[in-house]
């Protein structure tokens, strides 16, 4: 099975951050953290994963509300519950 990085590179020809768009070797990030919803059946769903640069990755971990736009766009609150939206 291909990783998100391999798929992204195959489709676009290079890797980039899905948040800010910079060309980089991105981290694969769980939008809803494993520590938030341990053993949730949707945790490894590809819709809950995003490729991000180190700066954007750190931003998500610094303040969960930084991810709200992505949570709503991908409708992750419907999969994980509305408590994943943070103010």
Image: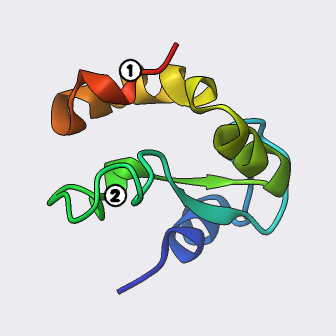
Q: Quadrant of the N terminus?
A: bottom left
Kindly identify the residue that appears in the image at 76 percent across and 48 percent down.
Answer: 58
Q: Give the residue pinned by disc 2.
A: 46
User: Mark 1 Cα within 10 Å, few/some/many (few <14, many 20+)?
Assistant: some
> Residue 44 or 38: which is nearer the viewer?
38
Disc 2, SS: helix
Tell me which label, 1 or 2, sits earlier in the chain.
2
* Residue at 66% over, 32% down: 63
Quarter of the figure with residue 29: bottom right
Q: Judge left or right: residue 40 versus residue 20.
A: left
Q: Is residue 82 left or right of residue 22?
A: left
Q: Is residue 36 above or below residue 62?
A: below
- Residue that protrudes farthest toward the bottom in the picture: 1
Q: Residue at x 14, y 60 (%)?
A: 41
**Residue lying farthest top?**
87
Is residue 2 shown above or below 74? below
Q: Which residue is mark 1?
A: 72
75 w.r.t. 80: above or below: above
In the rendered image, residue 53, in percent from the top left (x then y), is placed at 78, 54
Residue 75 visible, this orientation: no
Q: Nearer the viewer, residue 71 or 15?
A: 71
Answer yes or no: do the residues labelled 1 and 2 have beta carbons within 8 Å?
no
Q: Nearer the viewer, residue 60 or 45?
A: 60
């Amino acid at each position: 099975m291909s990783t998100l990085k391999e798929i992204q590179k195959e489709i676009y020809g290079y890797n980039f951050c899905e948040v800010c768009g910079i060309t980089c070797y991105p981290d694969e990030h769980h939008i809803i953290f494993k520590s938030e919803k341990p053993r949730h059946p949707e945790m490894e769903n590809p819709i809950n994963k995003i490729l991000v640069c180190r700066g954007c990755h750190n931003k998500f971990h610094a303040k969960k509300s930084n991810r709200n736009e992505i949570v709503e766009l991908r409708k992750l609150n419907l999969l994980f519950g509305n408590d994943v939206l943070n103010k």
